[in-house]
Amino acid sequence: MSAILSGRHGGLLLLALVLALLPLAFPSTYALDVLTNVGIAAIVCVGLNLLIGYAGQISLGHAGFFGIGAYSSAILVTNEGWPPLLAMLTGMALSGALAFAVARPILALRGHYLAMATLGLGIIVSIVLSQEVALTGGPDGMPVDPFTVAGFELATPRAWYVTVALSLLVVTWLALNLVDSPIGRALRAVHGAEIAARVCGVDTAGYKVMVFVLSAVIASYAGSLYAHFAGWLTPDEAGFLRSIQFVTMVVLGGMASTYGAIVGAALLTALPQFLTVFHDYEQVMLGAVMMATMIFLPRGLVPTLAARLGRREG
C-alpha cells in the first residue's frame, strides 16, 4: 500500500478507484450528500496543505476565501442572473485579487503573528457578509439557485457527487504536479530554512505570495460548489470555526501530504455522522478521537502510517 501511495500516478489511480466505488458502497441519498461534503472540504484542504504543509505558512482565515466564492456565486447567480460558471470564475478572481493584495504584508509575519493576521482577515470577511443584509441576507442567510451549464442542471445527489469527485481529482493532480516541480522544491525550502533559501537566490516572498493566492482561489472554487450544492448560504461558512475546521483537517491527515489532507477532510466530515449514536456526547467523542490521533500519530494519519508500513516492509 505504501508503495502505491508513494507514486504520484499510482496514488491518483487509487484515489480515482476509491471515488468510483464509494457511491456503489453507499448508494443512499444521505450517504451521497455526506460524500459530496467530504469532497468539497477535501478540495479546500488540498489547496490549504500547499500553504501550510509545504510552504509552512499558517492561515486561520481561509474560510473567508471559501465564503467569498460561495457568496459571489449566490449573489451573482440568484440576484443578478449571471451564468453559474461566470459567477464562479468571478469569485475565484475576487479571492485571488484579495489574497494577492494582502499576501506580502501578511506573509512577512511569522509564527503566531501570521496566524493572528490571517485570523483577522477571515473575521473581516465574515463580518462584512453578516452586515451586508441587502446583498447576503445577513445572519439569516440567502437561497442559492441551482447550478446549470448549457441547460443542464446539477439536481441529483449522484450528479453532484460525480462533479465534486472529478473536481477533487483535478485539484489533487494539480497539487501533486506542483509539489514535484521546482516550485514545490522552492516551497519546501521556504518551509525548512527560509533565510538559507533566500541566500541561495530563491524568491521566498514571491513563492509565498503565489501559493497563498493559489490556495485562496482553490478555496473560492470549493465555496462556489458548496453554495449551489447546499442551496442555502449563511455567513457561518466564512466564519472562524470553519477556518479552524479546515486547518484541523490538514493537520489530522498529515501536513505536507496531499493524500493526508484528503483523509483528514474525510474523517472530520464523515466521523460526526457515525458519532451521533452518542447523542449529547458526540462532540466529546470527536475530540477524544482527535486527541488520540495526535498523541499516537503525531505526524498525522497518512505520513505516520506510511512510515510504519515502510519500516515493516523493509
Image (cartoon, rainbow, N blue to C red):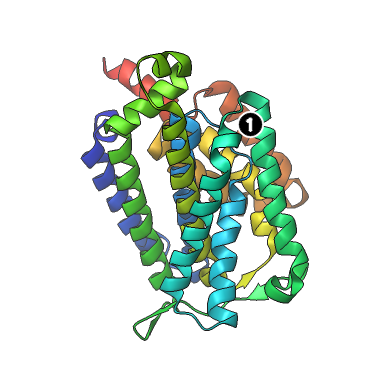
- Residue at 43% x, 40% y is 210
Going by the image, does 225 lie left or right of 67? left
Nearest the viewer among 128 and 279 is 128
| Residue found 56% across the figure and 55% down from its top | 66
Q: Specify whether residue 129 is in view.
A: yes
Q: Is residue 220 left or right of residue 176?
A: right
Question: How many marks can you see?
Answer: 1
Q: Quadrant of the C terminus?
A: top left
Q: In x, y percent, where is residue 266? A: 49, 47
> Please, what secondary structure does the residue beneath circle 1 have?
helix
Is any part of residue 255 visible from this angle? no
- Residue toward you, 208 or 19: 208
At x 51%, y 57%, the residue is: 220
Residue 73: x and y, percent? 53, 70
The image shows residue 148 at horizontal and vertical percentages of 42, 80
- Asked if 47 appears above or below 298 in the picture, the reply is below
Q: Please state which amino acid type lies under the numbered disc 1.
A: Leu
Which part of the image, by quadrant, shows the N terminus? Answer: top left
- Mark 1 neighbour class, 10 Å CA radius: few under 14, some 14 to 19, many 20 or more: some
Compared with residue 206, is residue 280 higher up or lower down, i.e. above or below? Answer: below
Q: Position of residue 267 (x, y in %)?
A: 52, 44
Q: State whether residue 287 is above or below residue 185.
A: below
Front-most of residues 224 and 10: 224
Q: Which residue is mark 1?
A: 114
Residue reaching furthest to the bottom: 151
Relative to 71, say whether 287 is above or below.
above
User: Which residue does the image show at 61% across and 28% down from the upper left?
Assistant: 109
